[in-house]
Image (cartoon, helix red, strand yellow):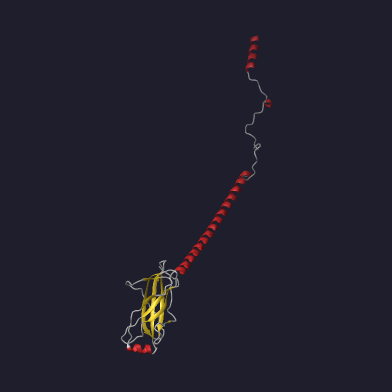
């Protein structure tokens, strides 16, 4: 009997002890706080930009605007400088033109002289003298004259540049004694009659061609006439035909 009691005690000792469910310890919750704990609660929209990012963005925009303003100011200044340079260049060109006009040679005819009054069978010609009223020499000077008899006031002769070589000379400034001469002509009896009746006059047309020290080509046209019975050196200038290039020089 003692053996049976001993066996019952061993079974009780080896069997698991019954636990009251109400007395069991609570199991820790490892899911974390469902409301986010101390984290800020998001309500609908995106996360708000931190203040330092707002400052950085504002500084970037302001810097960009300042850069654009500086660029516009630079462009405006560039246009102003371009306009000033154009004005300066034009002023320099005008100064150069004025200098050329002031320093260049200016050739005109100063006086004429008929070698003798025309007679039948005798050739005549007219000497004419050139003066340089400019401040520098006239280079490569030559002239193309023509002597003829006409009534009224004929139109100016048209002169083409010679296709063959012609003698050229230099007319110094202040000179009034450079002489040229027309080719000789002879008048027929009828022409002499008209001339001596003063119905016709003895005309000289000429063009003076030369170059200034700046390499520009210039010209002067001459028109004058002599009336029978007047002194041989008495000529009158025509109402038109005495012109100069007026500085419209060409190379």
> Dividing the picture into quarters, in which one does residue 200 lie?
bottom left
Furthest toward the right, the residue is 22
Can residue 1 be seen in this snapshot?
no
Nearest the viewer among 83 and 61 is: 83
Taking the image as shown, residue 108 lies to the left or right of residue 61, namely left
Front residue of this view, candidates 49 and 73: 73
Question: Residue lying farthest top?
Answer: 2
The tally of labels here is 0
Q: Is residue 41 above or below residue 216?
A: above
Residue 153 screen position, x and y as percent = 41, 84
Q: Residue at x 47, y 67 (%)?
A: 99
The quarter of the displayed image where residue 229 is located: bottom left
Image position of 93 (left or right of 142): right
Q: In which quarter of the image is residue 110?
A: bottom left
Can you give x and y, in whole percent of width and height, for residue 5 in the image?
A: 65, 12
Compared to residue 52, the image places residue 131 above or below, namely below
Spot occupied by residue 31 in the image (x, y as percentages of width and height): 62, 33
Quarter of the image that includes the C terminus: bottom left
Quadrant into which the N terminus falls: top right
Q: Taking the image as drawn, is residue 111 in sight?
A: yes
| Residue placed most toward the observer, 205 or 175 | 175
| 46 lies above or below 95 | above
Residue 167: % across, % down: 34, 72
């Amino acid at each position: 009997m003692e053996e049976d009691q001993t066996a019952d005690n061993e079974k009780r000792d080896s069997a698991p002890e019954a636990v009251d469910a109400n007395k069991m310890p609570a199991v820790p919750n490892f899911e974390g706080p469902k409301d986010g704990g101390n984290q800020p609660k998001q309500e609908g929209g995106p996360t708000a930009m931190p203040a330092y990012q707002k400052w950085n963005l504002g500084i970037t925009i302001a810097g960009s605007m300042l850069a654009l303003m500086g660029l516009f100011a630079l462009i405006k200044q560039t246009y102003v400088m371009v306009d000033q340079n154009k004005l300066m260049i034009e002023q320099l060109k005008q100064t150069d033109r004025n200098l050329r006009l002031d320093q260049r040679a200016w050739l005109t005819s100063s006086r004429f002289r008929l070698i003798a009054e025309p007679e039948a069978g005798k050739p005549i010609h007219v000497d004419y003298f050139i003066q340089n009223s400019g401040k520098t020499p006239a280079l490569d000077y030559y002239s193309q004259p023509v002597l003829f008899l006409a009534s009224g006031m004929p139109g100016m002769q048209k002169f083409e540049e010679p296709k063959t070589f012609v003698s050229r000379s230099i007319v110094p400034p202040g000179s009034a004694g450079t002489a040229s001469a027309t080719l000789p002509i002879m008048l027929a009896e009828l022409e002499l009659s008209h001339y001596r009746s003063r119905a016709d006059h003895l005309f000289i047309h000429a063009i003076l061609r030369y170059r200034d020290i700046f390499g520009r080509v210039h010209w002067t046209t001459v028109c004058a006439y002599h009336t029978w019975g007047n002194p041989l050196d008495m000529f009158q200038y025509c109402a038109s035909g005495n012109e100069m290039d007026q500085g419209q020089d060409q190379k």
